[in-house]
Amino acid sequence: AIQLTQSPSSLSASVGDRITLTCRASQGINSALAWYQQKPGQAPKLLIYDASSMESGVPSRFSGSRSGTDFTLTISSLQPEDLAIYYCQQFNTYPFTFGPGSKVDIK
Amino acid sequence: QVQLVQSGAEVKKPGASVKVSCKASGYTFTSYYIHWVRQAPGQELEWMGWINPNSGATHFAQRFHGRVTMTRDTSLTTVYMELSRLTSDDTALYYCARDKGGVATSALVYWGQGTLVTVSS
């Protein structure tokens, strides 16, 4: 199975900061990667699909990119409501594995 | 609007089976795959498999082969996930989620509210 490694596992940042989360795939997955945001007590919410396509209704401060097997989710200006765990998921190869998540706290 | 509404929480004994339902509304039921994802308490998400509501075809993660069944009732626009031979490791929140659609699955767009399954003697 393809393994996804996310870093950092957690971070604390201030409102207005630019933060970057990374998801690394153990082998090539083309651009078949999605990013989700999961707030406490809620189901995951899709943010980005196909590595860099923004889902409708998602604030423009979220963006995704790919470089080989490294994928990044960037929040350009962190907001209080962005407190959540962020997961990546690959859709290139079965099983469609998730990363372990990156927890984002607000200072 | 698209909605996925799941059945209520379940408590099962080890060795038993559980069947969770997911009723879809707000879109053409047969046009999008439904996936099942679970999340043990405080743990990461785990993809279990999908069902094609149109044909009934399924695909499961290898680790669930032989233990999981996914079915659908098109007249009720509902899909079902049954997991057998439960152990304490199956205690988790089980989600159904709808595929984004297209030629190949690219993301899970709409999610149910989750069904907590607790396995305890």
Image (spheres, coloured by chain):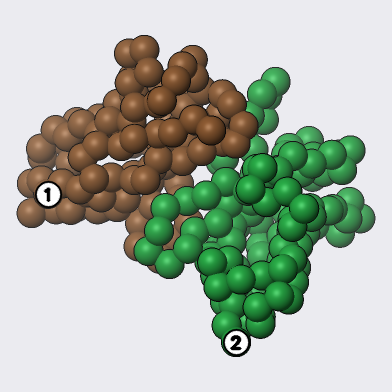
Chain letter, brown in picture: A
Q: Which residue is mark 1?
A: A12
Image coordinates of residue B8 in percent, x first then y, are 65, 75
Residue B35 location in percent, x, y? 66, 46
Q: Which residue shows up at 59% across the image and 26% down it?
A: A93
Chain letter, colour green: B
Looking at the image, residue A15 sits to the left or right of residue B74; the answer is left
Mark 1 belongs to which subunit? Answer: A
- Work out whether A75 lies above or below B104: below
Snapshot quadrant of residue A42: bottom left
Q: Is residue A60 visible?
A: no
Disc 2 chain ID: B
In this figure, which residue is indicated by the disc labeled 2?
B121
Q: Residue at x 55, y 73 (%)?
A: B88
The residue lying toward the viewer, choosing from A12 and A7, is A7
Q: Is residue A107 above or below residue B92?
A: above
Query: What amino acid does circle 1 point to?
Result: Ser
Image quarter hosting the C terminus of chain B = bottom right
Residue that protrudes farthest toward the bottom in the picture: B121
Q: Is residue A84 visible?
A: yes
**The one of B58 and B112 positioned closer to us in this rendering:** B58
Residue B96, relative to residue A90: is it above or below? below
Rendering coords of residue A21 (x, y %): 25, 34
Q: Is residue B58 left or right of residue A92?
A: right
- Badge 2: how crowded within 10 Å, few (<14), some, or many (20+)? few
